[in-house]
């Protein structure tokens, strides 16, 4: 039998294949990045837990708490989210260490690299954390109801967390702070929390009490104009964060602030005072100085 020495054979490729890194948790995309309606970090945690069909408590305790360090992890009998976060879950959407630790842990687990924009961490060098976020949730029932009717995702925009904002930027009605069913307030993240539902009685937060009218939820025109101004400037900061090439610093903003003061009409000094009192350290008015 003759052998064909010219026959060629396919060889196995023994090189190591290039396999993409896989996330431990679902690579869940956050809602509204670079828009005024971007969701809050605590809202993202609730949606991520729901995507895994577990409670936020189970998600935090099993996947996140081990990465946060011993200062967050307590004994077996104290493993509630309120204990882990010392009843300061509002700080998870803010500018401090708690927000940064949770962002780092979630980004490691999900491989999403943009979760810091669900907080105010971009502005941590120039924003005063004190009185920045409200201690309990506020929400717009009209938004919840519209999203539900249109089969959209139910979530919590970051701007609802700000203590200085009391209205919905879309409907211009006052935000609710108590469940319309059991009248209880809502912390930003609890063990069984689900966006749009009361963490105490599980009632739908898109409902409006029968004894309230549209007029009851509408501010007087002067207050409404002021709230619109406040909300508009804050949500612009939120939307601007992912577009910045560098993290804002106090030195850069201070230089622009001095120029701004020289050109500020006397009638706008109350706006300058607002930023000083509520959002910005003594030498900064971020939005105006970054967008002269």
Image (cartoon, rainbow, N blue to C red):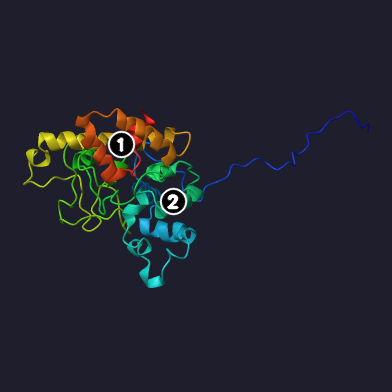
Residue 36 in sight in this render: no
User: Measuring 38% from the left and 63% from the top, which residue is drawn there?
Assistant: 84
Location of residue 160 in the rendering, given as x and y in whole percent from the top left corner = 26, 44
Lateral position of residue 212 relative to residue 53, left or right: left
Residue 61 in sight in this render: yes
Q: Which mark is residue 48?
A: none
- Furthest-right residue in view? 2
Q: Earlier in the sequence, mark 1 or mark 2?
A: 2
User: Measuring 51% from the left and 49% from the top, which residue is drawn there?
Assistant: 108
Location of residue 140 in the rendering, given as x and y in whole percent from the top left corner = 21, 42
Q: Can you say which quadrant of the picture contains the C terminus? A: top left
Q: Which residue is mark 2?
A: 100
Lateral position of residue 10 relative to residue 152, left or right: right
Q: Please state which of residues 138 and 286 is positioned toward the viewer in this rendering.
A: 286
Q: Can you say which quadrant of the picture contains the N terminus? A: top right
User: Measuring 76% from the left and 39% from the top, which residue is drawn there?
Assistant: 12
Location of residue 55 in the rendering, given as x and y in whole percent from the top left corner = 36, 56
Q: Residues within 10 Å of mark 2 (few under 14, many from 20)?
A: many
Q: Which residue is mark 1?
A: 235
In this rendering, is residue 144 above or below 45? above
- Quadrant of residue 253 in the image? top left
Q: Please state which of residues 142 and 14 is positioned toward the viewer in this rendering.
A: 142
Q: Please state which of residues 130 and 193 is positioned toward the viewer in this rendering.
A: 130
- Quadrant of residue 172 in the image? top left
């Amino acid at each position: 039998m003759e052998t064909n020495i010219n026959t060629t054979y396919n060889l196995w490729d023994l090189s190591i294949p290039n396999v993409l890194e896989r996330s431990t948790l679902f690579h869940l995309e956050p809602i509204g990045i670079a828009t005024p309606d971007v969701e809050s970090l605590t809202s993202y945690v609730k949606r991520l837990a729901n995507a895994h069909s577990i409670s936020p408590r189970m998600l935090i305790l099993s996947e996140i708490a081990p990465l946060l360090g011993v200062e967050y992890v307590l004994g077996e009998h104290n493993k509630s989210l309120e204990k882990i976060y010392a009843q300061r879950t509002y700080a998870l959407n803010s500018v401090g260490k708690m927000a940064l630790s949770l962002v780092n842990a979630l980004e490691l687990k999900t491989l999403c690299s943009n979760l810091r924009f669900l907080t105010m961490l971009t502005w941590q060098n120039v924003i005063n954390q004190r009185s920045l976020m409200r201690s309990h949730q506020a929400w717009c029932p009209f938004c919840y109801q519209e999203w539900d009717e249109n089969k959209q995702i139910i979530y919590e925009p970051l701007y609802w967390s700000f203590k200085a904002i009391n209205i919905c930027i879309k409907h211009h009605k006052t935000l609710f702070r108590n469940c319309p069913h059991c009248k209880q307030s809502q912390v930003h993240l609890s063990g069984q929390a689900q966006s749009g539902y009361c963490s105490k009685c599980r009632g739908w937060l898109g409902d409006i009490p029968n004894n309230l009218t549209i007029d009851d939820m509408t501010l007087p025109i002067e207050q409404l104009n002021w709230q619109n101004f406040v909300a508009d400037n804050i949500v612009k900061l939120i939307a601007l964060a992912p577009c910045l090439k560098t993290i804002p610093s106090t030195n850069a903003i201070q230089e622009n602030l001095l120029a701004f003061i020289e050109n500020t009409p006397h009638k706008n000094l109350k706006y300058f005072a607002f930023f000083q009192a509520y959002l910005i350290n003594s030498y900064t008015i971020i939005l105006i100085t970054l967008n002269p």
